[in-house]
Image (tube, grey):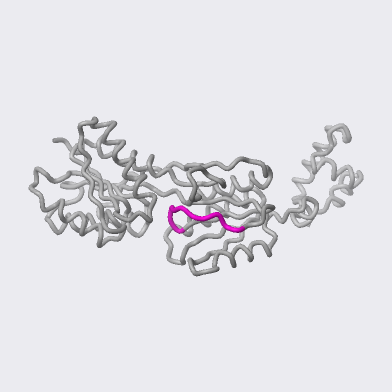
């Protein structure tokens, strides 16, 4: 490891002069050309500050914790942890990932584990977008929410969430721009999911904006986001006479879309020739292996977790920041399940 002493010996100057230049305290104290030469030499020699020593001086560990309510089979876990890890490293922090279950006391135990490691801040990530209570964390430890919001009407902590209404609006607009006017939405009938209302709102807003106030949105709800529930809900649509069937459906999730596709095929319909489908989530095992490949809206977990870490680092360095809610856009992923349709 290259030390300040090594740089000082190389340039024939004092260690204190090197320290002033590398800690950007040289203004008015070190000749500017010499200060720049010190920094160039340090970079060429591969000098890196000792994070432990810097942490002792600043009373910081330069470690943050990601406490995530998830399981090993969670399709979003790799994106969640990967995005957080990259953003933490970029900011000079170590990320400690602590997965937890919903078992009683599990989160409290995870918080204690994080605090025992002297983390500078904590990101609390939910297993799906939902409301949650404020955890018991010392006032000296900054924290924020990822993919969840507090129980009140206004954020009491900083929250990073996906803009699901925007994503749904774009998905529906895409179907309409492809020439579909007889379109529908297959949602879910489960109030545990805040996304239920947000995705339906995006669908309704797009129909109203592009097809006019007189358009009547076709909406049916599955019992839950599973494949079987999606298939059961869609079956009634395809039993209708051909003239009354929708030519395109936007679905609450990729799994819902998978079930809808199964129901369509059972009724002799081809995708996307007879029915265009757009999903939501961009889960690889359904969207990539869907036949035809599924056009869908991505839940941007990697970008969300990156942004959550950046927000947390800002909060650590600026403790008086006001809580706010940050929405990350949900991009539409174009694949093969939408056909341009002309009545």
Q: Is residue 51 above or below residue 181?
A: below
The prevailing secondary structure element of the residues shown in magenta is: strand
Q: Which residues are magenta?
A: 127-136
Residue 217 % position (x, y): 22, 40
Name the residue located 20 percent from the left edge and 59 percent from the top edge: 232
* Residue 132 sits inside the magenta stretch: yes
Res 302 seen here: no
Residue 328 % position (x, y): 47, 43
Residue 317 % position (x, y): 69, 44
Name the residue located 47 percent from the left edge and 51 percent from the top edge: 301
Residue 108 % position (x, y): 58, 65
* Residue 184 sits inside the magenta stretch: no
Res 126 seen here: yes
318 with respect to 209 (left or right): right
230 with respect to 243 (left or right): right
Q: Quadrant of the C terminus?
A: top left
Q: Tell me the quarter of the picture where residue 166 sits.
A: top left
Q: Quadrant of the N terminus?
A: bottom right
The total number of labels drawn is: 0
Name the residue located 74 percent from the left edge and 54 percent from the top edge: 51
**Residue furthest toward the front?**
152
Name the residue located 27 percent from the left edge and 53 percent from the top edge: 257
């Amino acid at each position: 490891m290259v030390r300040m002493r090594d740089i000082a010996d190389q340039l024939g100057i004092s260690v204190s002069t090197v320290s002033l230049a590398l800690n950007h305290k040289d203004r008015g104290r070190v000749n500017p050309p010499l200060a720049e030469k010190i920094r160039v030499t340090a970079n060429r020699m591969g000098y890196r500050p000792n994070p432990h020593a810097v942490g002792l001086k600043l009373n910081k560990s330069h470690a943050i914790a990601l406490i995530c309510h998830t399981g090993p089979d969670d399709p979003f876990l790799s994106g969640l942890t990967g995005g957080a890890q990259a953003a933490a490293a970029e900011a000079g922090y170590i990320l400690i990932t602590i997965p937890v279950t919903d078992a009683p006391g599990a989160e409290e135990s995870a918080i204690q584990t994080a605090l025992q490691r002297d983390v500078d801040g904590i990101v609390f990530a939910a297993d799906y977008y939902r409301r949650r209570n404020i955890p018991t964390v010392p006032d000296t430890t900054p924290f924020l929410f990822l993919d969840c919001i507090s129980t009140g009407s206004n954020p009491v902590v900083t929250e990073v969430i996906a803009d699901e209404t925007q994503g749904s609006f774009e998905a529906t607009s895409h179907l309409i721009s492809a020439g579909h006017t007889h379109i529908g939405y297959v949602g879910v009938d489960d109030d545990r999911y805040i996304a239920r209302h947000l995705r339906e709102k995006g669908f309704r807003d797009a129909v109203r904006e592009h097809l006019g106030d007189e358009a009547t949105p076709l909406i049916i709800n599955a019992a839950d986001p599973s494949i079987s529930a999606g298939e059961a809900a869609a079956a009634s649509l395809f039993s209708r006479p051909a003239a009354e069937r929708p030519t395109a459906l936007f679905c609450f999730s990729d799994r819902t879309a998978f079930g809808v596709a199964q129901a369509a095929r059972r009724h002799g319909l081809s995708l996307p020739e007879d029915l265009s489908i757009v999903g939501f989530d961009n889960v690889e095992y359904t969207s990539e292996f869907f036949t035809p490949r599924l056009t869908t809206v991505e839940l941007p977990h990697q970008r969300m977790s990156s942004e959550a870490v950046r927000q947390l680092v800002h909060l650590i360095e600026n403790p008086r920041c006001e809580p706010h809610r940050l929405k990350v856009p949900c991009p539409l992923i174009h694949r093969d399940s939408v056909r341009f349709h002309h009545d």
